[in-house]
């Protein structure tokens, strides 16, 4: 049941809107500090080579150069998300493992001087045999990229639940298919930039990031600087999509140069550098075997998924797991076996993504449509039949609490007139559906929880302090809206201090979809603490009970007798007079099984709650050119409760662009270890003319734990938009695709296959 609210649930402009549309919002590259130097990086020309010698003396002689660093200036510390994946030195001293890897860097008084100095750094390499295909990389005798990883297998996730082989043998219908997908570029509008300033033993940093506390801890370890002397500060982020999740070599380089020079250092990557030397998205090969009963009930799944991880571990265990988890959190799979392999190759590092796993997810959903057609079941009905409901347990033992999956399926099907369009199909016109779920916060140790402080100022306004970070989703505005609801003051009366590791306490950051569910709950708890303190004073002054008091529009008043009222600022000032200022404190830790581990124990409660979503896409295919047009897209999302429906709708629309339209155009192109499309001219991203007419639907399942019932807002559509478009293409062509993206050349091949079958 929904509680009556004043501001939560209302369509309000985001608090950061004005600064961004007027261009006054600052990003890392905008920063100017006194005496600041410009950094440039020398990168590897080889995909795999031993470093024999690095000579930086010539660069140091260039007038205006203040510092030069290489891997021999580091501290020998290797980084990894987990202790068992610490293999990345940020600046290598042994060998380079991909084209574009950071080898050395300079800091100079201007960009021209820094670029000139790079030419004077002499690196002697011994080229080594390289491997680029994960299947080749796994073979015996393939060149080892890291000596301690046999067959270049970085991570192997093995999940085995029930009796898969027995269930497959008993199944009415069994189908097995393999799907491939090229890796993608994050293609955020802001190329990576970092500013580092080391003064008096303290390191200040500004960079786009998804978790400032996690970033500060990593740099403390890499640079051997005490954690309390590493400060990651708040800065706007020009896009993230998963690509800002981890510490970057650029962070380490800028910091090391600042330490050596004693001056602030700014490093801004070019668009090409951003593509070849920051983490991008995994290529995937997914083999999916499914067994069903005669009525379409899924009884078994058997998976083998291979992820091209590039040169280093990055988020290896997480990235290898997430496509499977978001699927098992959506559908009932009593017997399932998953073997996921993340494999090293001599390509750039692959990382997490907001719509990770398109070959796996689109493959599962299109296979479901194939099965439905084979056994005479409607695609809507087969999804509802197998979809999870509240109170059920996933295959790996997570309990589903609030769940609006069935409502999203029904709403999307109704808005798109799905059943009629599916049944009355015509050549080259298709409709497809995709479903998925998303965890809200997964185990990150003691960083899984968030805490918040709020202080009431003497004018009755408030300042909230939280480690939550905004990567463009609207998290800052969302937190202010929650605080406004609890404290009874308008959003413009609230200041926010966030994403600054010195001022704020631990928070998981904009990572694992925890911002609203975890961070928002912490802000709500802190504001409720402050509210109680205000009410305690108001009870005395108004001579009434706690239950009778309401806070709204900067006023405290009696519900029973609204004439009995006083400004909130009066109660706040009274607290100052009493020497007990109103200061609220709150924290929230989601219910998670902390014995659960990505590799060694992939069982137990994965997250505090889960969101659900359904996408429906319509496609029209030009039979002459193979070009796909997506005229209409419907996105239905269960976010528990929308704190700001307008912001959630924006996330849904962005998800359609990032993942839905990406299905037909986005993919990295390679010549062995060389990326052929590292810029936005050759790497195709959707333009306004490519976008469909988008219709959104927000489902309110009112999560019992979420702040005002809220959960994550929009990522389910980003994870299933691929599937909807892919299923629509299958429906339009009548032929199963094998490889993504679905570019015109591949569509023409599918058309030819269909003609051959018809003949």
Image: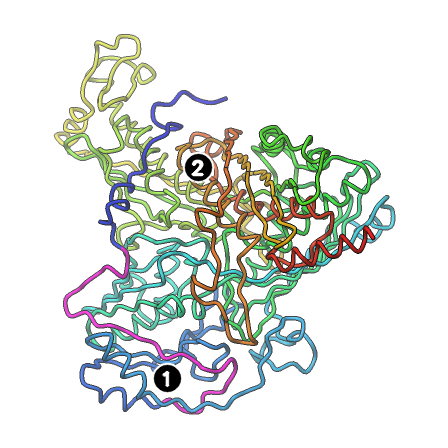
Residue 365 among those drawn in magenta: no
Please give the name of the residue rendered at 60% of the width and 53% of the height, measured from the top-left corner: 323
Residue at image x 43%, y 52%?
447
Q: Is residue 227 left or right of residue 96?
A: left
Which one is in front, 202 or 756? 756
Residue found at the very far left of the displayed protein: 577
Q: Which residues are magenta?
A: 27-54
Q: Is 167 placed above or below 741 here?
A: above
Whether residue 129 is visible: yes
Residue 480 quadrant: top left
User: Gap between marks 2 and 1, in whole Å?
Assistant: 48 Å
Q: Is residue 390 visible?
A: no
- From the image, tell me which residue sits under label 2: 648
On the image, the x and y values in percent for residue 359 come to 63, 56
Q: Earlier in the sequence, mark 2 or mark 1?
A: 1
Side of 139 relative to 14 (left or right): right
Estimate how packed mark 2 is, as few (under 14), some (14 to 19) or many (20 or more) residues with alpha carbons within 10 Å.
many
SS assignment at label 2 = helix
Query: Circle 1 is placed at which residue position?
Result: 72
The numbered dot on residue 97 is: none
Q: Toward which corner of the image does residue 193 lie, by quadrant? A: bottom left
Q: Nearer the viewer, mark 2 or mark 1?
A: 2
User: Where is residue 452 shown, x and y percent of the image?
Assistant: 33, 42
């Amino acid at each position: 049941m929904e509680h009556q609210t004043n501001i939560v649930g209302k369509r309000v402009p985001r608090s950061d809107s004005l600064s961004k549309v007027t261009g006054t919002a600052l990003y890392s590259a905008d920063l100017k500090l006194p005496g600041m130097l410009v950094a440039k990086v020398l990168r590897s020309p080889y995909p795999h080579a031993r470093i024999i010698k690095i000579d930086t003396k010539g660069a140091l002689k260039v007038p205006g150069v203040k510092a030069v660093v290489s891997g021999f200036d580091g501290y020998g510390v290797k980084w990894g998300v987990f202790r068992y994946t610490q293999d990345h030195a940020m600046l290598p001293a042994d060998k380079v493992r991909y084209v574009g890897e950071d080898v050395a860097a300079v800091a100079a008084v201007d960009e021209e001087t820094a670029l000139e100095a790079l030419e004077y750094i002499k690196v002697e390499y011994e080229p080594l045999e390289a491997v680029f295909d994960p299947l080749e990389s796994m073979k015996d005798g393939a060149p080892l990229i890291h000596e301690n990883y046999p067959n270049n297998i970085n991570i192997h996730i093995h999940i085995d639940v029930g009796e898969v082989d027995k269930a497959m043998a008993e199944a009415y219908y069994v189908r097995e298919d393999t799907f491939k997908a090229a890796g993608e570029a994050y293609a955020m509008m802001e190329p990576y930039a970092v500013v580092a300033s080391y003064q008096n033993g303290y390191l200040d940093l500004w960079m786009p990031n998804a978790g400032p506390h996690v970033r500060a801890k990593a740099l403390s370890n890499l640079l051997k600087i005490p954690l309390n002397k590493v400060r990651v500060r708040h800065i706007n982020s020009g896009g993230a999509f998963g690509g800002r999740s981890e510490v970057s070599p650029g962070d380490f380089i800028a910091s090391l140069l600042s330490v050596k020079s004693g001056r602030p250092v700014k490093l801004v990557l070019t668009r090409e550098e951003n593509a070849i030397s920051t983490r991008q998205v995994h290529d995937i090969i997914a083999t999916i075997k499914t067994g069903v009963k005669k009525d379409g009930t899924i009884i078994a799944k058997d998976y083998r998924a291979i992820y091209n991880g590039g040169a280093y571990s990055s988020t290896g265990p997480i990235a290898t797991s997430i496509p499977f988890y978001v699927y098992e959190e959506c559908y009932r799979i009593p017997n399932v076996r998953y073997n996921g392999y993340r494999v090293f190759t001599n390509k750039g590092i692959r990382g997490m993504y907001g719509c990770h796993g398109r070959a796996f997810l689109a493959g599962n959903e299109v296979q479901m449509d194939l099965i439905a057609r084979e056994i005479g079941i409607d695609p809507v009905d087969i999804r509802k039949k197998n979809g999870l409901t509240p109170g059920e347990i996933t295959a790996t033992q997570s309990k589903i609490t609030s769940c609006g999956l069935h409502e999203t399926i029904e709403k999307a099907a109704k808005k798109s007139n799905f059943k009629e369009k599916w049944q009355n199909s015509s050549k080259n016109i298709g409709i497809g559906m995709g479903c998925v779920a998303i965890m809200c916060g997964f185990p990150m140790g003691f960083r899984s929880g968030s805490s918040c402080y709020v202080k009431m100022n003497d004018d009755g306004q408030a300042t909230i302090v939280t480690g939550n970070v905004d990567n463009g989703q609207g998290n800052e505005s969302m937190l202010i809206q929650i605080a406004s609801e609890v404290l009874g003051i308008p959003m413009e009366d609230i200041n926010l201090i966030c994403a600054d590791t010195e001022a704020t306490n631990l928070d998981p950051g904009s990572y694992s979809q925890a911002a609203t569910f975890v961070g928002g709950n912490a802000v709500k708890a802190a504001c409720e603490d402050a509210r109680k303190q205000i009410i305690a004073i108001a009870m005395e002054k108004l001579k009434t009970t706690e239950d009778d008091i309401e806070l709204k529009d900067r006023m405290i008043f009696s519900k029973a007798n609204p004439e009995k009222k006083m400004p909130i600022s009066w109660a706040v000032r009274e607290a100052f007079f009493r020497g007990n200022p109103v200061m609220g404190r709150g924290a929230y830790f989601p219910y998670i099984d902390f014995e659960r581990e990505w590799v060694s124990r992939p069982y137990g409660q994965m997250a505090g709650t889960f969101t659900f979503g359904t996408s429906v896409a319509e496609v029209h295919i030009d039979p002459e050119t193979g070009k796909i047009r997506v005229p209409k897209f419907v996105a239905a999302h269960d976010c528990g409760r929308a704190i700001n429906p307008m912001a959630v709708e924006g996330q849904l629309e962005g998800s359609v662009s990032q993942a839905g339209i990406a299905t037909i155009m986005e993919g990295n192109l390679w010549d062995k270890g060389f990326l052929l499309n590292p810029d936005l001219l050759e790497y195709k991203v959707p333009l306004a003319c490519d976008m469909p007419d988008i219709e959104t639907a927000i489902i309110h399942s009112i999560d019992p734990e979420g702040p005002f019932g809220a959960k994550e807002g929009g990522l389910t559509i980003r994870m299933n938009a691929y599937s909807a478009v892919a299923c629509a293409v299958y429906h339009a062509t009548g032929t199963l695709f094998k490889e993504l993206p679905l570019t015109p050349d591949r569509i023409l091949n599918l058309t030819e296959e269909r003609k051959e079958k018809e003949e």
